[in-house]
Image (cartoon, rainbow, N blue to C red):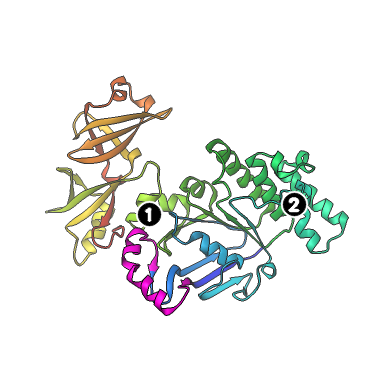
Amino acid sequence: MAEVKLVNIKKVYPFNGSEKKKQKEKKTTDRFAEKKANLQVTKEGVVAVQEFNLDIADKEFIVLVGPSGCGKSTTLRMIAGLEEISGGELYIDGKLVNDDAPKERDIAMVFQNYALYPHMTVFENMAYSLKLQKKSKAEIKEKVEEAAAILDITDYLDRKPKALSGGQRQRVAIGRAIVRHPKVFLMDEPLSNLDAKLRNQMRAEIIKLREKIDTTFVYVTHDQVEAMTLGDRIVIMRDGFIQQVGKPQEVFSHPANLFVAGFIGTPQMNFFEGTFVKHEDGYRVRVQGREFDIPEAKQAVLKTMEKVPEEVIVGVRPVHISLSDDGIKARIDVSEMMGSELHLHMNSDGKDIVAVVPVSESDDPLLEAGHREVCYTFKPSLMHFFDKKTEKNLF
């Protein structure tokens, strides 16, 4: 078990080839950057991760989450020693390991594509690293059988990977890492190759596994559901930078900025153009032609500001939008039945929004028909306010 500390970690992929080639690449930088906005190109090369600071406590389960190309897998590979660190310091269990080889870091990694040896049985795959460590046959057998029992794959020890399902192969890959009893367990999108039902089952298995082996986990995913259900804390990344670090409920209820607010939560948060309106007793916010009161706690913050921004972006989660007899008018374009919920895709004054309505509370079967007029509203206490220029959460 170990603490992991990343201090100002940076990763730059330098340009390859001659100076002439570099100049040619530089000319295409702007066009390339427009297509891949998540990559920052400098004279040194392509910057994948920068100013990454994070303290991971012993036995903590940390999840790195973000869109493709945000730098999360690169960060994980730097922890593993599979990528060279361009700048900053990495400590594992208090030891600086920037220049240590992967085998010297006492970590184990589970990859997205399982990376099993096809010619070996499950037992042989799980035992391979122990054989390299010159462990005795008795110790190898004990550790493999122990890991197999934890993962419920004892019956498959004599089979080869081609005879296993995707979920079973992933369990073998996890088991191969478990047998080493590493200080740090790294997982790089281990469930992304599985179908939706199997992903749900494997998420539950990983939660159980964490309780059984009780070690430090660093888990990478682009799936926010995995992040919210697995992590003690979530690290949300974008363009190589950390956007927010916090507990799942914290980042859901108090997103640091517009990106986090839009990334965390399914369906995505609705965003409206809003305006703060000064009144004698404080401020109100105008959204979609209607004015809403602002809660007292937020009023107090506004009164302490040197300059209150006039224009803001107001965020409201779909589950916090409710239909009403008198409210903002909208037209239902699409209605999706999701079991106990209806996802209503509506157009309100040219603005596309989504509302989630519980079926049990909706006794109007016409909501399913679509293309009908309704009114909606939301509670001011459930609104999020973002500065239009900086995109930061004002409260």
Residue corresponding to mark 2: 125
Q: Mark 2 Cα within 10 Å, few/some/many (few <14, many 20+)? A: many
Residue topped by disc 1: 260
Q: Residue at x 84, y 56 (%)?
A: 139
Location of the C terminus by quadrant is bottom left
Residue 379 visible in image: yes
**Where in the figure is residue 277, as x and y percent of width and height?**
14, 53
Q: Nearer the viewer, residue 148 or 325?
A: 148
* In the rendered image, the vertical position of residue 231 relative to residue 336, given as above or below: below
* Residue 253 part of the magenta segment: no
Residue name at image x 33 percent, y 25 percent: 362
User: Is 338 drawn above or below residue 300 in the view shown?
Assistant: above
The amino acid on which the numbered mark 2 sits, given as a three-letter code, is Asn
- The image quadrant of residue 39 is bottom left
Quarter occupied by residue 341:
top left
Disc 2, SS: helix
Seen as rendered, the residue at the extreme left is 280
Q: Which residues are magenta?
A: 11-40
